Image (cartoon, coloured by chain):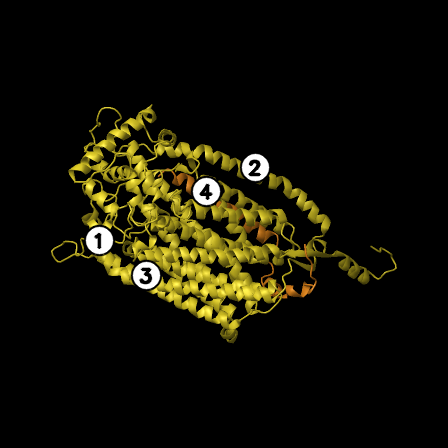
Chain colours: A yellow, B orange
Amino acid sequence: MTTSDTIHPELRHQQARADAVETFRYDNGIVRAFAIATVLWGIVGMTAGLLCAVQLFFPAANLDLQFVTFGRLRPVHTNAVIFAFVGNGMFMGIYYSLQRLCKARMFSDTLSWLNFWGWNAIIVSAAITLPLGFTTSKEYAELEWPIKTAIAVIWVAFVINLLGTIMKRREKHIYVAIWFYIATALTVAILHIVNGLEVPVTMWKGYSIYAGVQDALVQWWYGHNAVAFFLTTPYLGLMYYYLPKAANRPIYSYRLSIIHFWALIFIYIWAGPHHLLYTALPDWAQSLGMVFSIMLIAPSWGGMLNGLLTLRGAWDKVRQDPVLKFMVAAVTAYGMATLEGPALAVKTVNSLSHYTDWTIAHVHTGALGWNGLLTFGVLYWLFPRLYRTQLWSTKLANYHFWIALLGMVFYVIPMYIAGITEGMMWKQFTKEGFLQYPNFLETVRQIIPFYQLRAVGGTLYIGGAWLMAYNLWRTARAGAFAPEEEVQAVSYRSQPGAAGEAAFTHRWLESKPMLLTGAALVAVLIGGMIEIIPMIVVKENVPTISSVRPYTALELLGRDLYIREGCLACHSQMIRPFRSETERYGEYSKAGEFVYDHPFLWGSKRIGPDLHRVGGKYPEAWHYNHLDDPRSTSPGSIMPRYLWLLTQKLDTTSLPARISALRRVGVPYPPGYENKALEDLNQQAAKVVANLKTGQVKAQPDREIIAVIAYLQRLGTDIKLAPKTTADSGTGLRASN
Amino acid sequence: MIVILLLIPLSIMIAAIFLLAFIWAVRSGQYEDTSTPSMRLLLEENNTKKDKKENE
């Protein structure tokens, strides 16, 4: 304040600096909230996974309750682990490190808590709706449109909070971790919105605006980048903050971290099609995905090496400190998963590995190893700091580490063996040129022991998580939590010699019109996309195979039940053009066959056989008995019983709305079909019942199972019809039997 | 496959946003110093006034 001329210039300089020191407070309350949520949801998500794992060798473990069958529980597990455990873990890590790296409190406390409560309310709603069967069926994007919309809103709140904090930072340099956070925030928003576009039908049902191949491509563009930008980039950001912190050493090469960041984000976004190798996707798109996947090795390993080399000369610390142990193992797992990923994206390898448990092994190296262990490491590091005390028991944390590692080994190795076994058995021919294992069940029985071992591994891993929860709880009890942490810092904007405040203000003003223009552009793009996408997408859905027709009313409802029960968790609907597959399942799948599939149901895993050509393969009565008790028709099957399909009445109330909604996305139902749909449905149901009767099964026409059977019998049959068949009388939809 | 006409521009748009961010970062001198940022991370605790407990 004193501006006397008598003061020596040097002293005045110092005075100015002292004046510029700002006192502010870090928000630790929000960090603690996310940390506790991380621990709780971690245990919930892993337990859901264990329940899934047990059902795969002991189907009766679902107690014949529809809400906890494998098909409905699997999305609970994946969503809980990805969005609840890793999601909260990411927010925990970001909210703590961002404030410190920016030397600023979070931009808005309101947004922080909106982020926390909104995100966790979304998770709770997921935990309720997914067991009820409200699902879009698109992997890692299963939540129906009201929840999906909420996710977009909460995510935007997070993005504003993140960018706002960066804007008001006191530290000029944006540390590499923050760049990773920015990449995450921005990309996830776009992916989520584009993949999630749906036409709502009822409160809990919508149809993807994309169909068939297009839906598949959009889904895996999203699905792959969800892994890239939800499970990888934010956690790399955390690695770049917490690993140096825990080791008390600077990152091995800051320069490498910058190169690795930019290379990673520029390459990652193009690799999505590797999820669809040898499917009905065009060849060039598959090759593009494959090439970019292989290129990814370089930036991925750049990150891993940077992490590991940070500890050069400090490996004695790793021996002592459980936090570092977790982090080292996590980074190693990251390196393994990112070498394996590109390998699996090579078409030759993929032809064997796809649809098998190899994929499951791969993702769990990532989930249990990279995300899980890194989260544990950060939690062990963070809790003592939040509570201003020591970790309650280092010994227990060390036990946790070894148990978790053992759990991983017991999980991943059996899954590798299972995956390769499946892949080879499915492809094995006899000398005479017949399939060696024509019965799919033989290949299932072969891998049951590995499913059992996997459950042991999962149990160990969860046991470790419980040890951690106890340890952290004791740590919290021993310490004293302060929700606010007071700090002082000088803003780079007020530092003499630097750009200076005036210059900053100027630049700030200058940047505002740019900012507004940018925001307007984004808004216009989103608005335009919502308008334009349905149009181009609908246009494309002109059938290329003239005999392919939309599903009838009954088949459509059956299909929606197939989605509700999560059948696609175990059954693919995509026969690849290999002799081993065409021998087993029939003619390979053509892109043109899926033009009315909203959403596509290709699946990604064959725990059971492919169903694309199941239509007409068995009589109706076989399906009825099989759904009633799979063991009665297929001894040794691990499929759950679907008893409720036999008893529950088919809900036809929203049928006209469903027909209209599908018409809006381009399915050519004849005008007025929605009014005749129920009548048509009853006619077809009567036929199914009549066919069931010839197979000695007495069933009522108004039950859900009738619709499911009608759908299964329709699957993949259109192509077998003569293209000229213009169907029977009224609707033109019915596939003549 | 026309949807690819949407996905490719979208991907390019994301990449373009990052490219602009990259150009900004280089131009504004973010990467002039690639050694101290990694050290500064470790020093931040010094700014913390310890044991000032405050409750909301």
Q: Quadrant of residue A33?
A: bottom right
Amino acid carrying label 1: it is: Phe
**How dense is the environment of label 1, judged by Cα within 10 Å: few (below 14), some, or many (20 and up)?**
some
**Residue A440: mark in rendering:** 1
Label whose residue precedes the other's in the sequence (2 or 1): 1
Q: Which residue is mark 3?
A: A415
Q: From the viewer's side, name the closer residue of A22 and A202.
A: A202
Determine the chain carrying the residue at label 2. Answer: A
Separation of residues labelled 4 and 2 (CA atoms): 17 Å
Callout 4 and callout 2 share a chain: no
Determine the chain carrying the residue at label 1. Answer: A
Discs 3, 2 touching: Cβ within 8 Å:
no
Separation of residues labelled 4 and 3 (CA atoms): 36 Å
Name the side, left or right, on which A718 lies relative to A166: left
**Residue A489: mark in rendering:** none
Looking at the rendered structure, the secondary structure element under dot 4 is helix
Separation of residues labelled 1 and 4 (CA atoms): 41 Å
Q: Nearer the viewer, mark 2 or mark 1?
A: 1
**How dense is the environment of label 3, judged by Cα within 10 Å: few (below 14), some, or many (20 and up)?**
many
Residue at 56%, 37% in the rendered image:
A520
Give the image location of residue B22, x and y in percent.
Answer: 54, 51
